């Protein structure tokens, strides 16, 4: 058995150890320039990218081939908590010469969650008279995955997987799954290897369990005295709702389809909103105006009643409820996609209500750089601003007790 090679990374006054193997061969930790693992709600599979220096010895004796296994282990030494312990399958690699003597190379390897059956074999099968909630369970069982189905969808019909891998089937079918006109389902495999099926509003209704505050001094110290407090030193805030609503000419949609006998048209004017921003303050430009005439053809006896609506509303809901993003370099922790967290942004001790409040975690990036520093970035989303001009002061419910 190969002897593990470990390295220690210090972040927020905590020690972490990392081990990396490619096809069972350890990558010397001193050579690693960057190691990044990404989880994202729009990608069904977690991804990894590793960049390391090589004198030619590693790749000469161990050529990196498509399909080989990458193992990544990241753990907290002091508390023996595994933040990441997963295997990935090599998708591609590249070798770049970085000096004129050809004695030093930069190796880049990327991969996806290692469950080969998900994306390397074509299947033709049907899932008769089932909801997509049940389909997800069947796909998980077929690939020896644990599943976490948090909702019961309203889309019972015959589902067909035709000349598709399981991963492609899930990616295309999720947009035909249906919960409600003002909600949108999501499915993904988290870093723990669990296939999750839930919806945006299901996640938004959860109670925030953690407070994040921008405090540069505390961000370099252990966790706060309260177990639910975390800190960050930098952030990026972005609002994209104007592009979705204004430049597109409207925020509502008109859905037309032929049911085998006649054309049917449904108008969806109400802009979806969540419970995370009841204090939002927007101009509502072009709200309730219709755009995007989505037309479908088919017979309703082959699909569920809201099938054609779902093709349009799922996209509309995602754009509306995920229009505002906030990325923070966070205290390392065991966070999960679609966790609901509360973020406080302060300036000179005063809370900035416009950017503060509840968010959903939409992306998690684990990164180790060439300086042996571990960083965890959370990409968070919601559907608006806080109302900084309100006569009622913004209150954080997690601090009221």
Image (tube, grey):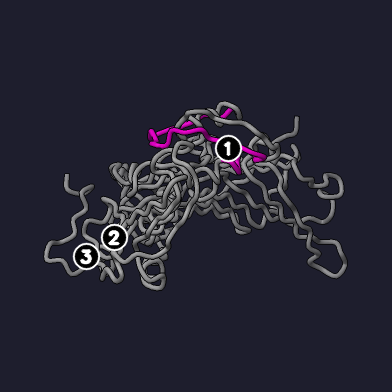
**On the rendered structure, is 354 left or right of 20?**
left
The secondary element bearing badge 3 is classed as loop
Q: Which residue is mark 3?
A: 387
Q: Which mark is residue 113?
A: none
Q: Residue at 86%, 64% (x, y): give it.
A: 102
Q: Within 10 Å of the Cα at label 2, are there few (<14), some (14-19), or many (20+) other Cα atoms? A: many
Q: Residue at 29%, 52% (x, y): give it.
A: 274
Q: Which residues are magenta?
A: 144-169
Q: Which mark is residue 356?
A: 2
Q: Is residue 35 above or below residue 86?
A: below
**On the rendered structure, is 153 left or right of 25?**
left
The secondary element bearing badge 1 is classed as strand
Image coordinates for residue 358, horizontal then vertical, percent: 30, 53
- Count of numbered tags: 3
Q: Which mark is residue 85?
A: 1
The answer to whether residue 162 is seen in the rendering is yes
Is 154 in the magenta?
yes
Identify which residue, 257 or 70, lies in the foreground.
257
Image coordinates for residue 324, horizontal then vertical, percent: 37, 62
**On the rendered structure, is 335 left or right of 366?**
left
């Amino acid at each position: 058995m190969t002897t593990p090679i470990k390295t220690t990374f210090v972040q927020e006054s905590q020690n972490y150890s990392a081990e990396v193997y490619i096809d069972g061969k350890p990558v010397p930790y001193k050579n690693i320039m960057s190691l990044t693992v990404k989880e994202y709600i729009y990608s069904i599979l977690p991804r990894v990218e590793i960049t390391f220096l090589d004198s030619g010895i590693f790749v000469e004796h161990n050529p990196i081939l498509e399909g080989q296994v990458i193992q990544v282990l990241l753990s907290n030494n002091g508390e023996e908590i595994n933040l990441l312990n997963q295997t990935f399958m090599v998708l591609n690699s590249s070798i770049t010469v970085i000096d004129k003597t050809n004695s030093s190379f930069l190796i880049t390897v990327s991969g996806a969650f290692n469950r080969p059956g998900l994306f390397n074999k074509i299947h033709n099968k049907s899932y008769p008279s089932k909801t997509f909630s049940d389909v997800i369970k069947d796909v998980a069982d077929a690939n020896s995955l644990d599943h976490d189905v948090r909702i019961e969808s309203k889309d019972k019909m015959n589902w067909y997987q035709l000349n598709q891998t399981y991963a492609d089937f899930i990616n295309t079918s999720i947009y035909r799954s249906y919960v409600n006109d003002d909600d949108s389902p999501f499915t993904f495999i988290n870093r723990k290897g669990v296939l999750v099926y839930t919806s945006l509003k299901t996640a938004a209704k959860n109670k925030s369990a953690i407070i994040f505050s921008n405090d540069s001094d505390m961000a370099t110290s252990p966790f706060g005295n309260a177990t639910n407090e975390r800190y960050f030193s930098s952030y990026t805030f972005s609002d994209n709702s104007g592009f979705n609503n204004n430049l597109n000419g409207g925020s509502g949609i008109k859905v037309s389809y032929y049911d085998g006998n006649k054309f049917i048209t449904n108008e969806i004017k109400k802009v979806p909103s969540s419970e995370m921003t009841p204090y939002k303050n927007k101009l509502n430009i072009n709200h309730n105006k219709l755009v995007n005439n989505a037309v479908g053809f088919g017979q309703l006896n082959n699909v569920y009643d809201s099938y054609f609506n779902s093709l349009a509303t799922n996209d509309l809901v995602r754009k509306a409820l995920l229009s505002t993003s906030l990325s923070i370099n966070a205290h390392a922790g065991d966070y999960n996609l679609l966790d609901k967290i509360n973020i406080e942004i302060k300036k000179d001790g005063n809370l900035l209500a416009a950017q503060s409040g509840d968010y959903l975690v939409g992306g998690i990036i684990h990164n180790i750089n060439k300086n042996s520093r571990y960083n965890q970035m959370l990409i968070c989303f919601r559907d608006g601003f806080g109302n900084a001009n309100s006569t009622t002061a913004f209150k954080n419910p997690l601090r009221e007790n």
